[in-house]
Image (cartoon, grey):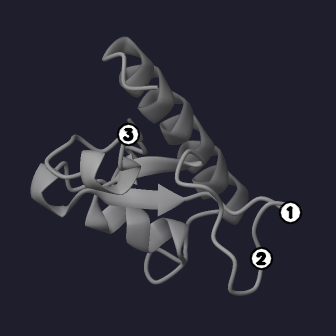
Amino acid sequence: MKIDLRKEAKGRGCMVRLPGVCNHNSETTVLAHCRVAGISGMGIKSSDLIGSWACSACHDAIDRRAHMDLDRDYVRLAHFEGMARTIAQLAKEGKI
Protein backbone atom coordinates (compact mmCIF):
# COMPACT_ATOMS: atom_id res chain seq x y z
CA MET A 1 0.00 0.00 0.00
CA LYS A 2 1.39 3.39 -1.03
CA ILE A 3 1.06 6.17 1.54
CA ASP A 4 -0.03 9.67 0.50
CA LEU A 5 2.67 11.82 2.09
CA ARG A 6 0.82 15.03 1.25
CA LYS A 7 -2.25 13.88 3.15
CA GLU A 8 -0.03 12.75 6.04
CA ALA A 9 0.96 16.39 6.60
CA LYS A 10 -2.57 17.43 7.55
CA GLY A 11 -2.87 18.21 11.25
CA ARG A 12 0.84 17.55 11.92
CA GLY A 13 3.24 19.83 13.71
CA CYS A 14 5.69 21.89 11.71
CA MET A 15 9.05 20.16 11.36
CA VAL A 16 10.89 23.17 9.91
CA ARG A 17 10.43 25.30 13.06
CA LEU A 18 12.09 28.53 11.94
CA PRO A 19 12.58 30.63 15.11
CA GLY A 20 10.53 33.81 15.05
CA VAL A 21 8.68 32.63 11.94
CA CYS A 22 6.94 29.33 12.76
CA ASN A 23 3.30 29.80 13.70
CA HIS A 24 3.05 26.32 15.30
CA ASN A 25 -0.41 25.98 13.76
CA SER A 26 -0.93 22.36 12.73
CA GLU A 27 -4.07 23.38 10.83
CA THR A 28 -1.85 25.10 8.27
CA THR A 29 0.73 22.32 7.86
CA VAL A 30 1.44 21.05 4.35
CA LEU A 31 4.19 19.05 2.67
CA ALA A 32 6.83 21.52 1.48
CA HIS A 33 9.01 20.01 -1.25
CA CYS A 34 12.77 20.54 -1.10
CA ARG A 35 14.44 21.91 -4.19
CA VAL A 36 17.45 19.83 -5.12
CA ALA A 37 19.54 20.22 -8.29
CA GLY A 38 19.22 17.17 -10.49
CA ILE A 39 15.96 16.11 -8.81
CA SER A 40 13.72 19.12 -9.25
CA GLY A 41 13.67 22.20 -11.39
CA MET A 42 11.54 24.44 -13.57
CA GLY A 43 8.07 22.96 -13.37
CA ILE A 44 9.34 19.72 -11.82
CA LYS A 45 8.61 19.03 -8.16
CA SER A 46 10.75 16.59 -6.27
CA SER A 47 9.32 13.34 -4.93
CA ASP A 48 6.98 13.72 -1.96
CA LEU A 49 9.57 11.86 0.11
CA ILE A 50 11.92 14.82 -0.38
CA GLY A 51 9.87 17.28 1.62
CA SER A 52 9.03 18.37 5.12
CA TRP A 53 5.90 19.16 7.09
CA ALA A 54 5.82 22.95 7.24
CA CYS A 55 3.34 25.40 8.73
CA SER A 56 2.12 28.16 6.44
CA ALA A 57 4.60 30.69 7.83
CA CYS A 58 7.63 28.43 7.43
CA HIS A 59 6.41 27.39 3.97
CA ASP A 60 6.19 31.05 2.96
CA ALA A 61 9.79 31.57 4.12
CA ILE A 62 10.95 28.44 2.22
CA ASP A 63 9.27 29.61 -0.99
CA ARG A 64 10.52 33.19 -0.43
CA ARG A 65 7.01 34.65 -0.32
CA ALA A 66 7.78 36.19 3.09
CA HIS A 67 10.64 36.69 5.54
CA MET A 68 13.02 37.72 2.80
CA ASP A 69 15.30 39.09 5.52
CA LEU A 70 16.26 35.53 6.48
CA ASP A 71 19.41 34.15 4.92
CA ARG A 72 18.52 31.78 2.09
CA ASP A 73 21.04 29.14 3.22
CA TYR A 74 19.71 29.29 6.80
CA VAL A 75 16.16 28.68 5.58
CA ARG A 76 17.36 25.88 3.28
CA LEU A 77 19.16 24.18 6.17
CA ALA A 78 16.05 24.44 8.38
CA HIS A 79 14.00 22.93 5.54
CA PHE A 80 16.40 19.99 5.13
CA GLU A 81 16.47 19.43 8.90
CA GLY A 82 12.67 19.47 8.78
CA MET A 83 12.80 16.85 6.04
CA ALA A 84 14.97 14.64 8.27
CA ARG A 85 12.53 15.06 11.19
CA THR A 86 9.57 14.31 8.89
CA ILE A 87 11.18 11.14 7.54
CA ALA A 88 12.18 10.05 11.06
CA GLN A 89 8.60 10.50 12.30
CA LEU A 90 7.14 8.57 9.38
CA ALA A 91 9.66 5.76 9.97
CA LYS A 92 8.83 5.72 13.69
CA GLU A 93 5.18 5.24 12.77
CA GLY A 94 6.09 2.44 10.34
CA LYS A 95 4.70 4.35 7.39
CA ILE A 96 7.92 4.32 5.36
Rendered-image quadrant of the N terminus: top left
Q: Is 42 situated above or below 71?
A: below
Circle 3: element type: loop
Tag shown at residue 37 = 1
Cα distance between the residues tagged 1 and 3: 22 Å
User: Contact, CB < 8 Å: mark 1 with mark 2?
Assistant: yes
| Label 2 or label 3, whichever comes before in sequence order | 3
Front: mark 1 or 3: 1
Residue at the extreme front = 1
Circle 2: element type: loop
Q: Nearer the viewer, residue 15 or 87?
A: 87
Q: Answer few, some or many: residues within 10 Å of disc 1's Cα (few below 14, many 20 plus, some between 14 and 19).
A: few
Q: Is 2 situated above or below 23?
A: above
Circle 1: element type: loop
Tag shown at residue 64 = none
Q: Nearer the viewer, residue 9 or 77?
A: 9
Cα distance between the residues tagged 1 and 2: 7 Å
Q: Which residue is mark 2?
A: 41
The amino acid type found where label 3 is placed reads Met
Q: Is 39 situated above or below 85?
A: below
Looking at the image, can residue 94 be seen? yes
The amino acid type found where label 2 is placed reads Gly
Tag shown at residue 15 = 3
* Rendered location of residue 8, percent (x, y): 27, 45
Q: Residue at the spot x=31%, y=66% of the render?
A: 57
Q: Answer few, some or many: residues within 10 Å of disc 2's Cα (few below 14, many 20 plus, some between 14 and 19).
A: few
Q: In the picture provided, is 85 more to the left or to the right than 42?
A: left
The number of numbered badges drawn on the structure is 3
Q: Answer few, some or many: residues within 10 Å of disc 3's Cα (few below 14, many 20 plus, some between 14 and 19).
A: many
Q: In the picture provided, is 93 more to the left or to the right than 40?
A: left
